[in-house]
Image (cartoon, rainbow, N blue to C red):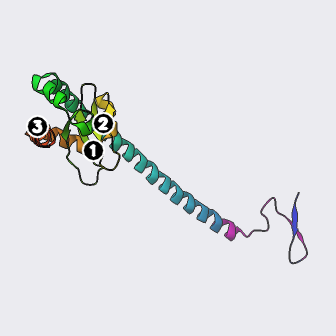
Amino acid sequence: MLYIRTLKGGRVSIEKDDFVPDEMKKLIDEKLAGMNREEASERAKRNKAKQDELKRQEEGLKNGLEHAKRIFEWVDGFRKTETGKKLIQLGNRGYLGGVYFFNGHVFGKPFRGLGFDNKSVWWISTGCGAHPRPLETPKELAEAIAPETLKLACEWIDTGKIWECIKAWHLERH
């Protein structure tokens, strides 16, 4: 058993907390309980934020996946047409002979241009040394590009703005 000497010359066991006044024990317990509540509250807030972020990401992937599927369907359909085949043949030297069809930008999201060739859909970013990155599935597209950007690409398909981009990149450039 461990003891400490008191100022009055006695000995008190430190294993039983006999030398700590009850009021001090109570204050310490209350402070710890308050800290534990605060920590628990902070942990709960962090966990909720993580869950919300995961839910947002899952929802974004789900929405992005729907848009990516539409983009792949459009590309597959266009690729099979005579015009699509001719355009791929005409190609664009800067984009591996493929068809660049989307160069829209969503503020606050990384720029991603979209194109396709005979084998895949691909995305490209701006900047020095930017090269097309091929994507084989809609899921890969949804994971690589923000849902907002994919939504805008689908809007371009729906409104026909996509043809303006194709015309500018493939028919008007020398």
Secondary element at tag 1:
loop
Magenta-colored span:
9-26
Q: Position of residue 118 (x, y in %)?
A: 24, 25
Secondary element at tag 2:
helix
Neighbourhood count class around disc 1 (C-alpha, 10 Å): few under 14, some 14–19, many 20 upward: many
**Residue 59 shows in this picture:** no
Q: Which quarter shows the C terminus?
A: top left
Residue that mark 2 sits on:
142
Query: Residue farthest to the bottom?
Result: 8
Q: Which quarter shows the N terminus?
A: bottom right
**Residue 34 shows in this picture:** yes
Neighbourhood count class around disc 2 (C-alpha, 10 Å): few under 14, some 14–19, many 20 upward: many
Question: Where is 85 relative to 31, above or below?
Answer: above
Closest to the observer: 7 or 77?
77
**What amino acid type should be assigned to the residue bearing mark 3?**
Asp
Toward which corner of the image does residue 4 lie, by quadrant? bottom right
19 drawn magenta: yes
Q: How far apart are marks 2 and 1 (CA)?
A: 12 Å
Question: Where is 3 relative to 45, above or below?
Answer: below
**What amino acid type should be assigned to the residue bearing mark 1?**
Arg
Q: Which of the labelled discs sits on residue 158, or is there none?
A: 3
Question: Where is 93 relative to 24, above or below?
Answer: above
Residue that mark 1 sits on:
112
Q: Position of residue 42 (x, y in %)?
A: 48, 56
Depth check, mark 3 against mark 1: the one in front is 1
